[in-house]
Structure formats: C-alpha cells, structure tokens
C-alpha cells in the first residue's frame, strides 16, 4: 500500500509540475494497480527501459527518415566545433546513462530522489525531464567523484 500512496503523490506532483510524462506514467501505474493487473508490473520493470529507449531513438532518427537532415548538415557534424562537441556530448551522455542504469539497478531506492529532483528542476528551473537514466547517471557521477576524493 505504501507504493500506491507514493505513486499517487508522484501523480499529483506531476500534475502540479506540468510534467505530462510523469503524470501519465504514474497514472498508468495507478490504473494497473486499481485494475489488479499487477502481473504487468514485472514485465514493465524488466523491459520498460528498453522499450522507452527504442521509442526515444526512433523519435530522434525521424528527421533523417524525413530527409530533414541533408549531407551538408551531416558533414558539419564532423567538421564544426558544435558538431564535434555534440559527438563528445553523445559519448558522455551514453556513459552517464550507463552509470545511471547501474545505480538504479544496485540502489533502486534512489528513484524517489531522482523524481523529486526532476520535479524541483521542472517547477523552479523550467527544466525538461529527460528521464531517470540521465539523472541517475549524474548522481552516479557525483557519487564517483565523492568516492574518488574520499580515498
């Protein structure tokens, strides 16, 4: 029952923060619980991240499929400072996301902190939630730095 209450709180925080994705995610979980379809939860837990990443990757690749990005823009990626920094950013982001996934796997209790931080960022800093993997990756990086300096 505690989980249900926390999901309900997250649902209302998502509403208050204007975060459609958080509100819909929490609402779907509430609906699954209310309809007693709990057998879906382990499936979502096991495959949800992969399915979500699949749809995110599809959305990012759509401009290529629509021919909105031409050869000129592709070449600029490899020959301009913004393009090269974008490549570096992609490398760093994927590494941080991997660290975030490891953190969430090893310490799932941090998800509430990541959600609270995301909501604070949305409400007070006009941020855009990109998901718990990146937030977890940044938290894991901070933990790594603290561990490095505490030796």
Image: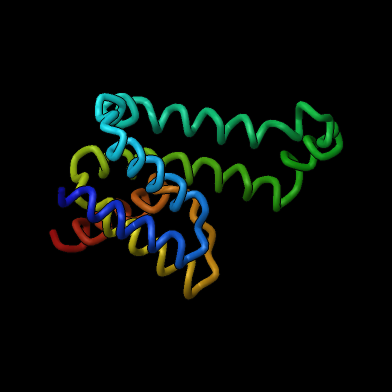
Q: Is residue 72 visible?
A: yes
At which x and y percent is residue 90? Answer: 55, 42
Q: Quadrant of residue 70?
A: top right
Q: Is residue 144 visible?
A: no
- Say left or right for 150 vs 38: left
Q: Is residue 16 above or below residue 102?
A: below
- Say left or right for 23 vs 109: right
Q: Quadrant of the C terminus?
A: bottom left
Q: Residue at x 86, y 37 (%)?
A: 72
Q: Is residue 42 above or below residue 110?
A: above
Q: Residue at x 22, y 56 (%)?
A: 148
Q: Nearer the viewer, residue 112 or 151?
A: 112
Q: Nearer the viewer, residue 37 or 47?
A: 37
Q: Residue at x 20, y 48 (%)?
A: 3
At which x and y percent is residue 94? Answer: 46, 39
Q: Is residue 139 above or below residue 84?
A: below
At which x and y percent is residue 41? Answer: 28, 30
At which x and y percent is residue 77? Answer: 73, 41
- Say left or right for 71 vs 145: right
- Say left or right for 55 vs 27: right
Query: How many marks can you see?
Result: 0
Q: Nearer the viewer, residue 118 or 83?
A: 118
Point out the residue furthest to the front here: 35
Q: Name the colouring of the figure.
A: rainbow
């Amino acid at each position: 029952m505690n989980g249900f209450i926390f999901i309900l709180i997250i649902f209302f925080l998502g509403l208050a923060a204007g975060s459609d994705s958080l509100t819909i995610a929490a609402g779907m979980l509430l609906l699954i619980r209310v309809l007693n379809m709990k057998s879906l939860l382990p499936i979502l837990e096991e495959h949800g991240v992969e399915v979500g990443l699949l749809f995110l990757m599809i959305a990012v690749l759509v401009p290529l499929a629509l021919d909105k990005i031409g050869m000129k823009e592709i070449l600029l990626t490899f020959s301009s400072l913004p393009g090269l920094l974008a490549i570096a950013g992609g490398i760093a982001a994927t590494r941080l996301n991997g660290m975030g996934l490891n953190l969430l796997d090893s310490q799932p209790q941090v998800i509430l902190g990541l959600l609270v931080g995301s909501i604070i960022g949305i409400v007070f800093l006009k941020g855009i939630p990109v998901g718990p993997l990146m937030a977890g990756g940044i938290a894991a990086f901070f933990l790594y730095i603290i561990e490095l300096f505490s030796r």
